[in-house]
Image: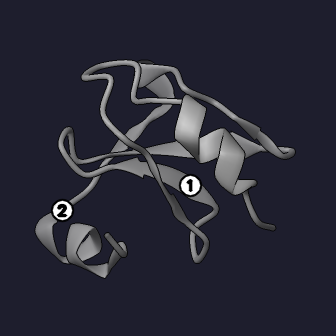
Protein backbone atom coordinates (compact mmCIF):
# COMPACT_ATOMS: atom_id res chain seq x y z
CA UNK A 1 0.00 0.00 0.00
CA UNK A 2 1.14 3.54 -0.65
CA UNK A 3 0.04 6.88 0.71
CA UNK A 4 -0.75 9.74 -1.63
CA UNK A 5 1.97 12.39 -1.40
CA UNK A 6 -0.64 15.15 -1.26
CA UNK A 7 -2.09 13.54 1.88
CA UNK A 8 1.31 13.64 3.58
CA UNK A 9 1.49 17.37 2.86
CA UNK A 10 -1.70 18.16 4.78
CA UNK A 11 -1.73 15.76 7.74
CA UNK A 12 0.48 16.15 10.79
CA UNK A 13 1.36 14.47 14.05
CA UNK A 14 -1.49 15.15 16.50
CA UNK A 15 1.02 15.66 19.34
CA UNK A 16 3.61 18.04 17.91
CA UNK A 17 2.00 19.00 14.56
CA UNK A 18 5.20 17.83 12.86
CA UNK A 19 5.59 16.18 9.49
CA UNK A 20 4.70 12.50 9.13
CA UNK A 21 6.69 10.05 7.02
CA UNK A 22 5.16 6.97 5.42
CA UNK A 23 7.03 3.83 6.55
CA UNK A 24 5.94 1.35 3.90
CA UNK A 25 7.62 -1.68 5.48
CA UNK A 26 5.32 -1.44 8.54
CA UNK A 27 2.41 0.41 6.90
CA UNK A 28 2.67 3.24 9.42
CA UNK A 29 3.02 6.99 9.53
CA UNK A 30 6.04 8.03 11.57
CA UNK A 31 6.71 11.23 13.47
CA UNK A 32 10.46 11.45 13.92
CA UNK A 33 10.19 14.29 16.46
CA UNK A 34 7.89 12.38 18.81
CA UNK A 35 9.39 8.97 17.93
CA UNK A 36 5.91 7.58 17.32
CA UNK A 37 4.45 5.35 14.61
CA UNK A 38 0.76 5.69 13.81
CA UNK A 39 -0.98 2.67 12.28
CA UNK A 40 -2.86 2.70 8.99
CA UNK A 41 -6.01 0.62 9.33
CA UNK A 42 -7.70 -0.45 6.08
CA UNK A 43 -6.08 2.47 4.27
CA UNK A 44 -7.06 5.05 6.89
CA UNK A 45 -4.37 6.70 9.06
CA UNK A 46 -5.22 6.34 12.75
CA UNK A 47 -3.81 9.56 14.17
CA UNK A 48 -4.67 8.89 17.81
CA UNK A 49 -1.78 9.13 20.25
CA UNK A 50 -3.07 6.21 22.31
CA UNK A 51 -2.92 3.96 19.23
CA UNK A 52 0.63 5.00 18.27
CA UNK A 53 3.62 2.91 19.22
CA UNK A 54 6.95 4.24 20.43
CA UNK A 55 9.98 3.74 18.22
CA UNK A 56 13.40 2.82 19.49
CA UNK A 57 16.55 4.34 18.00
CA UNK A 58 17.15 1.48 15.56
CA UNK A 59 13.61 1.65 14.17
CA UNK A 60 13.79 5.42 13.88
CA UNK A 61 17.02 5.22 11.88
CA UNK A 62 15.37 2.85 9.40
CA UNK A 63 12.70 5.41 8.51
CA UNK A 64 13.68 7.51 5.53
CA UNK A 65 13.84 11.25 6.04
Q: Which residue is mark 1?
A: 28
Instruction: Give the total number of marks visible in the rendering.
Output: 2
Mark 2, other Cα within 10 Å: few <14 / some 14–19 / many ≥20: few
Q: Which residue is mark 2?
A: 56
Q: Taking 4 as reference, is 10 left or right?
A: left
User: What residue is rendered at 21% in x and 76% in y?
Assistant: 61
**Image height check: is 12 above or below 41?**
above
Q: Image quarter for residue 10?
A: top right
Q: Image quarter for residue 8?
A: top right
Q: Nearer the viewer, residue 21 or 50?
A: 21
User: What residue is rendered at 30% in x and 33% in y?
Assistant: 18
Distance of mark 2 from mark 1, alpha carbons?
15 Å
- Tell me which numbered mark, 2 or 1, is placed earlier along the sequence: 1
Between disc 2 and disc 1, the foreground one is: 1
Mark 1, other Cα within 10 Å: few <14 / some 14–19 / many ≥20: many
Q: Nearer the viewer, residue 57 or 9?
A: 9
- In percent of width and height, residue 43 lies at 83, 46
**Image height check: is 64 above or below 16?**
below
- In percent of width and height, residue 31 lies at 33, 45
User: What residue is rendered at 37% in x and 41% in y?
Assistant: 19
**Which quadrant: the C terminus?**
bottom left
Q: Taking 34 as reference, is 43 left or right?
A: right
Amino acid sequence: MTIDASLLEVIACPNCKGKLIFAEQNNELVCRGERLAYPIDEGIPVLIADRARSLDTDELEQVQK
